Amino acid sequence: MTKWILGFVLFLQAISLQAQRFQPHWIGYPDVDSTAQIWFRQTYLCEGRPQFAMLEVVTTGYFDLYVNGYNVSTDVRMPFRKQAFNDRPISLCFDITRFLRSDSNTIAVWYSPSYPHIQPRQVAISYYGRDAENRPFSLVSDSNWLCRKANVRLDTTYDEIFHASDYSQTQWNAADFAPACWQGAVSLAADNSQKTDYRRVAYTAERVTKIITPTYYVVEGDTVCYEFNTGFHGYVRVTLRDANMKERLNINGLGYQCSGEMDEQAYRKFTRRTFRNVWITGDQHFKNSQIQRVEGIETAPYPHISWH
């Protein structure tokens, strides 16, 4: 048993050493600023469905990962960062075999700065595995990847502004998309001043732990206050009905511009706060009857175990 454990530890160390031999192939938005969240995407053609594929993402911020439109992880706000105002490169790996198709595969990443500051090195992606003929392949992010600003961004106080009314950016992570306003990403050399944190088998991640319903609400003029009676860390999700297109709301610092759809949900994408009560106010079109549901989404770190 002791020999088996020692062998397993040496195996894990070998994986870690192998990963550290490769320099991240960084890409970023051409005109980087301190608050923009960025969408990156690339479609790879193939002849037959790959037998096996992995995806490694290195980032200086936070990200969501999509393959052919599917979110590949149950974790939220990847990767977990213990300290605020930290942009150390962190690497995560995903087995994406089950999401692959036989003709083409679209990989898309939603990136956010970890805090409002300029960071040109935003993501580095490596897509590798074995194709339909069992031949090894390896592809990395470069200037052929496309990018554009997302419809959500940070503000200078580390809150978020969400423009749900921007329909030009729908289906951004699918195979069929509107190419207008997309441009080539900038390829950047590796920065050896910061060591990459490779997270492979056991590491801390973040997940949703509880959904909390407020106990009561109070209307004060053009503002509605929802009281939860208990504090929680995470974000708030507000379901709206019959809001006007481009109607503006403020939800405890989240600036939300409505899409005007019959039912829509306003929430933070990558920022977190501690809440006990929630204040919702709006412009001249806002009515408290538009609010159908308010939910507190509690998130917390947990030990993520992966055998990929």
Image (tube, rainbow, N blue to C red):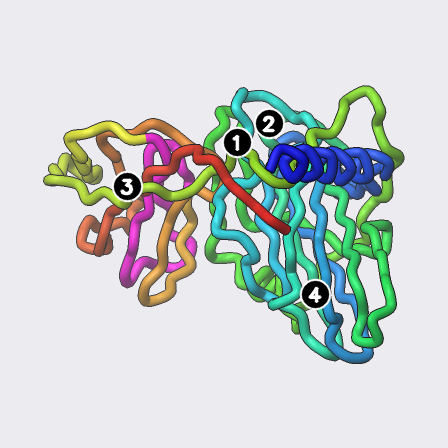
Residue at 47 percent across and 46 percent down: it is 162
* Labels 1 & 4 near each other (Cβ < 8 A): no
Residue 159 locus on image (x, y percent): 46, 32
Residue identifier under label 1: 155
Any magenta on residue 303? no
Tell which circle, 1 or 2, labels the residue nearer the N-terminal end: 2
Of the residues under marks 3 and 4, which one precedes in the sequence? 4
Circles 1 and 2: CB atoms closer than 8 Å: yes
Label 3 or label 2, whichever lies nearer to me, is 3
Residue on which disc 3 sits: 296
- Mark toward the viewer: 1 or 3: 3
The amino acid sitting under disc 2 is Pro
Q: Residue flagged by tag 3: what amino acid is it?
A: Gly
Query: Which label was assigned to residue 116?
Result: 2
Q: Which residues are magenta?
A: 233-255
Spatial separation of the CA atoms under disc 1 and disc 3: 22 Å
The residue sitting at 22% across, 56% down in the picture is: 292
Disc on res. 106? 4
Residue 267 image offset from top left, x and y in percent: 39, 46
Image position of 40 (left or right of 85):
right
* Position of 143 relative to 42 (above/below): above
> Residue at left 28%, top 63%?
242
Q: Residue 29 appears in which quarter of the rendering?
A: top right
Per the model, the C-alpha gap separating discs 4 and 2 is: 29 Å
